Image: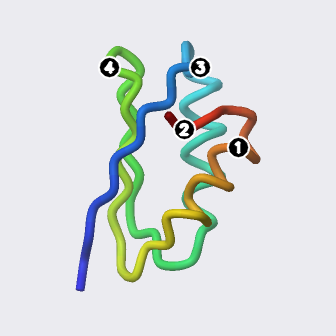
């Protein structure tokens, strides 16, 4: 069953940030899509059986913190 999780990532400011976060999240098992909105600092992840801890770890791996 598809689900959606949204995170606020205040440290993102540019396209490099957007790419880094999208790339790391895209490598997490179950992730089907990642949308990053730099203006609102929101990251929306869609997929199946999403693991909150794994997603937060991927955001941290990209060098950012999920609020």
Give the CA separation, mark 2 to mark 1: 7 Å
User: In the rendered image, which residue does mark 3 sit on?
Assistant: 11
Q: Is residue 24 left or right of residue 40?
A: right
Q: Position of residue 61 (x, y in %)?
A: 76, 47
Which residue is depicted at the point 72% across and 41% down?
62
Which residue is depicted at the point 50% across and 30% down?
9
Give the CA separation, mark 3 to mark 4: 11 Å
| Residue furthest out toward the bottom | 1
Give the CA separation, mark 1 to mark 4: 19 Å
Give the CA separation, mark 4 to mark 2: 13 Å
Of helix, strand and loop, which one carries label 1?
A: helix
Of helix, strand and loop, which one carries label 2?
A: loop
User: In the rendered image, which residue does mark 1 sit on?
Assistant: 60
Answer above or below: position of 50 versus 14. below
Among the two numbered marks 4 and 2 on one chain, the one whose residue lies closer to the N terminus = 4
Among the two numbered marks 1 and 4 on one chain, the one whose residue lies closer to the N terminus = 4
Say whether marks 3 and 4 touch (CB < 8 Å): no
Circle on res. 66: 2
Circle on res. 40: 4
- Closer mark to the observer between disc 4 and disc 2: 2
Give the CA separation, mark 3 to mark 1: 11 Å
């Amino acid at each position: 069953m598809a689900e959606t999780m949204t995170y606020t990532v205040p440290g993102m400011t540019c396209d490099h940030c957007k790419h880094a976060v999208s790339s790391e999240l895209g490598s997490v098992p179950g992730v089907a899509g990642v949308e990053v909105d730099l203006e609102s600092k929101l990251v929306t992840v869609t997929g199946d059986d999403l693991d909150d801890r794994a997603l937060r770890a991927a955001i941290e791996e990209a060098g950012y913190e999920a609020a």
